[in-house]
Amino acid sequence: MSGACGGRPHLDAASVGALLRPLHALADTQPQRPALHFRGRTIGYAKLWSRIERVAAHLLADWGIARGDRVATLCLNHDLQLALLFACARLGAIFVPLNYRLAVPELAAIASHAGVRAIFHDDAHADAAAAVAVTVTVPRASAEGVEGEGAGGTVRHAHIDRLIDSPAPPEPSDAPIGPMPDDTPLLLVYTSGTTGQPKGALHTQAALLANARASWWAHAMRDSDHVLSTLPMFHVGGLCIQTVPALLLGAQVTLHERFAPDAWLQALADARPTLSLMVPATLRAVLEHPGWADADLSVLRGVMAGSSTIPRAYIDAFHARGVPLGQVYGATETGPVSIVLRLHEAMARPGYAGWPQPEAQVRLLGRDGNDVADGEVGEICIRASNLMQGYWREPCHPGFADGWFRSGDLAHRDADGCIEVVGRSKDMIISGGENIYPAEIENALVALPGVAECAVVGLPDPRWGE
């Protein structure tokens, strides 16, 4: 990354990659257009771009961040997380949002595996960031910028506000950053680790842009939309299903530090959002809130939900109030927008995952590795333009081969091509030679009066097997 005279590379207009061009154009043509609302402040598109450039310059001048370096956050939702993500795209660096719900040893393991060089935190997570930083060593870099064996020092950390509160950095000189290829890695998000140690899913700038296109299609999103974003941005759901796509389109985003049902309901009156993303736990919290019955939901074009099976009672409750509750199926590895029940289809197909987004191919494979017939259950396998590049430091992982991601989820497809997820392959119960899918039983049980949540598991049986 060094220039001919040994100086740091500088930011130039020619190095704005495809992902950032929409933001750059919006800042140039509609500078006062509102982009982000956070903590009572409104940030227009010109100011957002200015922040991106300022953060990128700080990372270059004060932190020595170069192309390919990993930069982490450990904080509640913050507008500067988005500026940092886009600044990483500006530099060719890789953004690593850490899950603040994890314990320090878990965070340290992820930070070490990712080889992060810097951690930016908020007040609530300053101690955790410091504890992680002293236990993780930065990979040693050679003069050519190639990581080598051995330690290169401890990870640096600072409050996220330092990214813009510090004095303006000197403009780096010498060589420009240069062109930013579309396949430049940008986002490294770690899975939940439900099947073992967390794995890092690495996404390119092109994949994030492709995911934005999928989101625009999924929501029929337009620049007049206003997204209420409350889910944590350390997951691809909170970051990439609505938030980033809305900004790339020129829509508005109201960002909350974290979800709270009273704040979500109040925002309907104050911010007047047209779209929001929820999960079963947040849907339930809103439905059980005393303000639900009298809340004015008329401004909402719809709500999208995902992450796990949505109880039919939650779907019906929103539909009864005239709000379509669509669904997005995906995973950390898939961008995540893969299969979508769009808002205009939601009321006719409640509980279904929907159809593949236009740039995705979905196969349902049986145990023999062949595609199953309509109506039969198979494992969801996905190939798409917004799929991850691969697992970090695991280039030959069996769950991602020949460009196909094997989800481990089971589903069937009807004659119209609509897909319904029935459970996880590892959760399937085989009793008397018959396949039983826990999700189907769970959906029936939660429909009974007095049942709020349930889980179905198989037990060994000497006669039936399970």
Image (cartoon, rainbow, N blue to C red):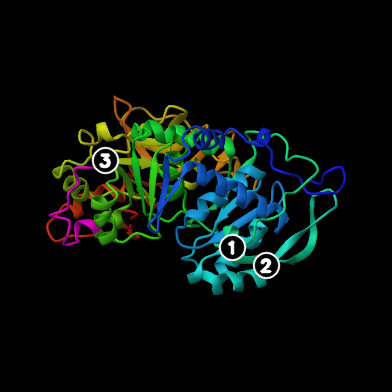
Instruction: Report if the CB atoms under discs 3 and 1 are less than 8 Å apart.
Output: no
Quarter of the figure that contains the N terminus: top right
Mark-to-mark CA distance, 1 and 2: 22 Å
Pointer 1 local density, CA inside 10 Å: few below 14, some 14–19, many at least 20 = some
Q: Position of residue 394 (x, y in %)?
A: 64, 48
Q: Quadrant of residue 137?
A: bottom right
Q: Is residue 356 visible?
A: no
**Extreme residue in the top direction:** 415
Mark-to-mark CA distance, 3 and 1: 37 Å
Amino acid type, residue under disc 1 in the picture: Arg
Q: Viewer-proximal residue, 172 or 367?
A: 172
Residue placed under numbered mark 2 in the picture:
136
Instruction: Report if the CB atoms under discs 3 and 2 are less than 8 Å apart.
Output: no
SS of the residue under disc 3: strand
Q: Is residue 8 magenta?
A: no
Q: Position of residue 152 (x, y in %)?
A: 78, 63
**Extreme residue in the right direction:** 5
Residue placed under numbered mark 3 in the picture:
302
* Numbered tag placed on residue 162 in the rendering: 1
Q: Position of residue 273 (x, y in %)?
A: 29, 45
Quarter of the figure that contains the C terminus: bottom left
Secondary structure mostly taken by the magenta-highlighted segment of the chain: loop
92 left or right of 369?
right
Q: Viewer-proximal residue, 86 or 218?
A: 86
